[in-house]
């Protein structure tokens, strides 16, 4: 009699896979990709190491999946922030602020997603996702030019400039070398620190697309 | 009698090392880090593969050295461009233009240095060098604030925004996927293409630091 996977077994398998992914995500959020280990993930998920490998071919594949899911979530958030009400500069400001604030509230994960040196495979995915961010920004800039809230410009190049500016300016603050080594888990930034970092970055980015001095809020 | 390295032998060794590095540089400039192979480097340099390994412990070490030398040259060029005459915005414009034009004139090498997915070791070096670029820009922005040619701003954050904006906006144009695959060696961009890419990038970057619409030249 051929083996048949029942619906219950299928659901159970999907649930285990999801739990492994959640635990792997938590590992990365606590110590970056570099410190994330399969046996630690297995222990957290309450499964044998071999079970992890039944769901994911390799460590690289598991953490590439963690990377994709977490990055897609950030890309979606940027898309949502840009889709709301307001002029293009207002929507861009909202999206940039949200991206930066989310990163600074989860600095280890943000570092892992944005800049941690990783395998070339994950690095390749990074380039793909940065293109996805840029496409959202490009659309908003194009709308701004159309509605007259932004001056004529190469929307595609300005969009990639935005992506680069915000990612690179967060790399330093997010870098683990700037965090106190004696802490098991680096603190999130407090509100004052976040404001001191985010406002100048938004100044630069909005001025880049508007060509006007941003008014202090 | 103990073996003594004569001056002549020492020079000969240094010359071979330099030739290996030059050939490795040429390999990367033609096909990126991904396609660069030790045996190809050895053949070009006219030495045995074993000789390459007498000078460099591993393939990774050889190409990390190629990366460092080539990137340091670009960092130095930015430093020189910023050190010349003119107001801070003029000097920043000169440095940004030179960085972008040099990249577009040698697109394969520039892609390899800026964005090609590479080993985490080289990726780590990239972060270090991006800090070096940012320090040069930070100094110029600080001088601009001091002389009144730039408005008050967080010079350090604006500098990292500049580095990110120019690097990220070049990633698309430099990416091998945007180049025709049938060419053995991708063409450099022509003058018209370079202008169409560089001017919008400089617009964004200068507007970011000045808060004023850049006048068309």
Image (cartoon, coloured by chain):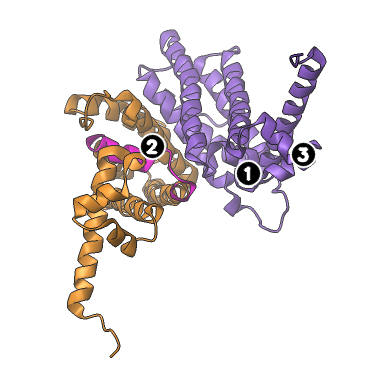
Chain colours: A purple, B orange
- Dots 1, 2 in contact, CB < 8 A: no
Magenta region: B103-122
Looking at the picture, do discs 1 and 2 lie on one chain? Answer: no
Q: In front of the other: label 3 or label 2? A: 3
Q: Is residue B181 above or below residue A178?
A: above
Given residues B147 and B176, the one toward you in this image is: B176
Give the crowd class for mark 1: few <14, some 14-19, many >=20 residues within 10 Å: many
Name the mark on residue B167: 2
Q: Give the residue at mark 3.
A: A48
Q: Identify the image quadrant of the N terminus of chain A.
A: top right
Q: Give the residue at mark 1.
A: A32
The CA span between labels 3 and 2 is: 44 Å
Most frequent secondary structure within the magenta stretch: helix
Give the crowd class for mark 3: few <14, some 14-19, many >=20 residues within 10 Å: few
Q: Residue at x 40, y 38 (%)?
A: B115
Q: In front of the other: label 1 or label 2? A: 1
Looking at the picture, do discs 1 and 3 lie on one chain? Answer: yes
Q: Identify the image quadrant of the C terminus of chain A.
A: top right
Q: Is residue A133 above or below residue A61?
A: above
Q: Chain of mark 2?
A: B
């Amino acid at each position: 009699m051929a083996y048949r996977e029942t619906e219950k077994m299928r659901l159970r398998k999907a649930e285990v896979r999801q739990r492994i992914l959640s635990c792997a995500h938590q590992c990365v959020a606590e110590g970056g990709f570099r410190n994330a280990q399969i046996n630690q993930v297995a222990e957290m998920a309450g499964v044998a190491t071999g079970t992890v490998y039944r769901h994911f071919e390799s460590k690289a594949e598991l953490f590439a999946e963690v990377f994709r899911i977490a990055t897609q979530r950030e890309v979606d958030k940027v898309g949502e922030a840009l889709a709301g009400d307001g002029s293009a500069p207002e929507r861009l400001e909202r999206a940039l602020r949200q991206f930066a604030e989310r990163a600074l509230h989860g600095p280890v994960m943000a570092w892992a997603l944005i800049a941690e040196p990783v395998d070339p495979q994950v690095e390749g995915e990074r380039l793909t996702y940065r293109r996805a961010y840029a496409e959202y920004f490009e659309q908003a800039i194009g709308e701004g030019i159309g509605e007259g809230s932004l001056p004529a410009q190469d929307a595609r190049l300005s969009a990639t400039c935005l992506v680069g500016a915000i990612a690179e300016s967060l790399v330093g603050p997010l870098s683990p070398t700037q965090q106190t080594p004696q802490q098991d888990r680096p603190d999130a930034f407090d509100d004052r620190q976040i404001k001191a970092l985010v406002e100048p970055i938004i100044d630069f980015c909005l001025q880049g697309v508007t060509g006007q001095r941003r008014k202090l809020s």
